Image: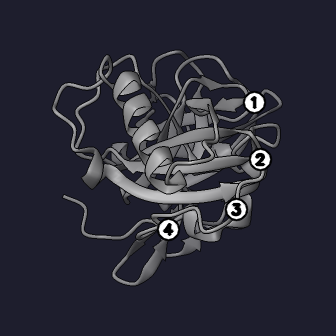
Amino acid sequence: MFFGKYIGQLSQKINSRISEKYIEIVLCIYTIEMGCTFPFVKYIIFERDPITFPSFVLEIPIDLDLDLYLKNECFRRIFSFLQNIHNIDLNFNEMFKGFLKGVNKVMAFFDATACEFKSNVKFCIIDEILHSYNSIVYDVFSRHSFLQNVIVSGKKVERPRLYYPHYSNIAKRHEHPFYGDFFYFSRKNNKGKPYAVFDFFDNNRLLLCEEKKDPISSQMFSFEENESSILCVKHLLHFIIL
């Protein structure tokens, strides 16, 4: 169970006039991942390059309650989208967190933490969104800092970063003569499955090995090998597959 806070309660109404005849509605469906060192947010996506959220284009009615109409259309579309990838009944009124107006689009946020998703679901983390400059959701997430972090006990939890293992399946390296046993990742290799990796602890970023006197005792460090920067993680709870 998650006892922290993420985004709180957004506006239940658009609170601004929509002049367009048609507008894009972006379904921002997120879950709070609690299987790692710290809780973090991950969003359901269609594609990773660029980050693509589920969305649809809606004709704006003239004689209907706009906010109620948008909410009902979101419920209808999210049911259609989720019915093939979740394993439990959904309560959309409890899941719905509110709207956020972007440029030529409306973001509708849904908390799907209680859902039990099947294995074919793709997720992204905030780190990916903030580095996906050509994504349609980049401008909203970059402008609104409250979308970027989970709050626990009144403090902002640093978010994990995206890394890929050197192989398609994560492997533990045993044979390194100096650094000992560790799991390792690289940003340069985009093959294999992506992992969310925490390289922040207690709100202070751990120093890299070249800056630290005793990298062997560090929980996380990096070094250069074969013209590639290797990120080393000592414990399984520091990372999780997306």
Badge 3 or badge 1: first in the primary sequence: 3
Mark 1: which amino acid? Answer: Lys
Q: 224 above or below 160?
A: above
Q: Which residue is mark 4?
A: 11
Task: Find numbered disc 4 in the image and state the secondary structure of the residue it sits on.
Answer: loop
- Looking at the image, residue 230 sits to the left or right of residue 240; the answer is right
Badge 4 or badge 3: first in the primary sequence: 4
Q: Which residue is mark 1?
A: 188
Count of residue discs = 4
How crowded pointer 1 is (Cα within 10 Å; few <14, some 14-19, many 20+) is rated as: few
Tell me the mark number nearer the camera, choosing from 4 and 1: 4
Note whether residue 21 is visible: yes
Q: Position of residue 27 (x, y in %)?
A: 52, 40
Q: Which residue is mark 2?
A: 104
Q: Which residue is mark 3?
A: 17
Gap in angstroms between the C-alphas marked 4 and 3: 14 Å
